[in-house]
């Protein structure tokens, strides 16, 4: 199963959130949480994700996987991918990569009326909170608690997000069927879904909270990647 990540819509959603919250600078942690919450609310109300990105549980809460990778793109990257080049066109990192600054507004023409309403709602309800407050709030989400892996990461199944927001198991089946069909059509057209594998694993580092076992192995399902 593969959902189709839409970078153009992700860029527009992030810029929309920055405008709606009145922030010229947005910390990466805040951006991660607001975008995840927007996708989560879109699933709750309309069984749709705005970005099409897949969710992972990391130490500081849930994140959108491909979005996370793009936000780590160095500004001086000499050979960026097409996705990274598009990200750098619209956003710049400051404060040693901790803050995001909007360079060129990508507009909002790809966002539906429903999606803009969801983004406005998220900006209104959560845009005034600090990064630490958003982190703490995201740690109350049942889907994150079920897959939290310390300073590593684990996929959050779509079914778990839908259950957490009160949608039925049947809703998950419908979305999974749609994703499979979209992937099939994309293959026929020669353009595979753009959600890509999450991270290149790094060696696991033990934490004070006892993640892993005495041999240094991760709990089942966890990916050896630190949330940096």
Image (cartoon, grey):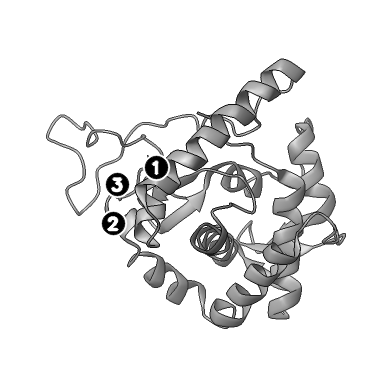
Q: CA distance from mark 2 to mark 3?
A: 9 Å
Looking at the picture, tell me which residue is in the foreground, 90 or 106. Answer: 106
Mark before the other along the chain sequence, 3 or 1 = 3
Q: Secondary structure at mark 2?
A: helix
Looking at the picture, tell me which residue is in the foreground, 62 or 157. Answer: 157
Q: Is residue 156 visible in this depiction of the protein?
A: no
- Residue occupying the point 21% across, 45% down: 211
CA neighbours of label 2 inside 10 A, class few (<14), some (14 to 19), many (20+): some
Task: Give the numbered dot on residue 149.
Answer: 3
Corner quadrant of residue 23: bottom right
Closer to the observer: label 2 or label 3?
A: 2
Residue hosting label 1:
157
Q: With respect to residue 21, does 40 lie above or below?
A: above
Q: Position of residue 146 (x, y in %)?
A: 27, 51
Looking at the picture, tell me which residue is in the foreground, 210 or 183. Answer: 183
Q: Secondary structure at mark 1?
A: loop
Q: Is residue 220 visible in this depiction of the protein?
A: yes
Count of numbered tags: 3
- Residue occupying the point 81% across, 43% down: 86
Task: Give the numbered dot on residue 145.
Answer: 2
- Residue occupying the point 71% across, 16% down: 188
Q: CA distance from mark 3 to mark 1?
A: 14 Å
Closer to the observer: label 1 or label 2?
A: 1
């Amino acid at each position: 199963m593969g959902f189709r990540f839409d970078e153009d819509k992700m860029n527009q959603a992030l810029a929309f959130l920055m405008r709606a919250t009145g922030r010229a600078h947005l910390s990466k942690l805040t951006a991660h949480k607001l975008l995840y919450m927007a996708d989560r609310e879109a699933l709750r109300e309309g069984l749709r994700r705005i970005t099409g990105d897949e969710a992972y549980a990391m130490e500081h809460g849930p994140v959108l996987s491909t979005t996370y990778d793009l936000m780590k793109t160095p500004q001086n990257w000499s050979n960026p991918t097409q996705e990274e080049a598009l990200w750098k066109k619209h956003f710049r990192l400051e404060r040693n990569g901790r803050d995001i600054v909007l360079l060129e507004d990508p507009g909002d023409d790809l966002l539906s009326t429903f999606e803009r309403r969801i983004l406005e709602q998220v900006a209104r309800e959560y845009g005034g909170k600090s990064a630490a407050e958003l982190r703490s709030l995201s740690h109350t989400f049942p889907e994150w608690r079920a897959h939290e892996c310390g300073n590593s990461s684990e996929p959050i199944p779509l079914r778990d997000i839908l259950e957490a927001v009160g949608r039925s198991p049947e809703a998950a089946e419908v979305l999974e069927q749609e994703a499979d069909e979209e992937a099939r059509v994309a293959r026929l057209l020669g353009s595979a879904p753009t959600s890509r594998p999450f991270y290149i694993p790094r060696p696991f580092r033990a934490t004070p909270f006892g993640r892993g076992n005495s041999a240094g192995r991760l709990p089942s399902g966890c990916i050896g990647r630190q949330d940096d």
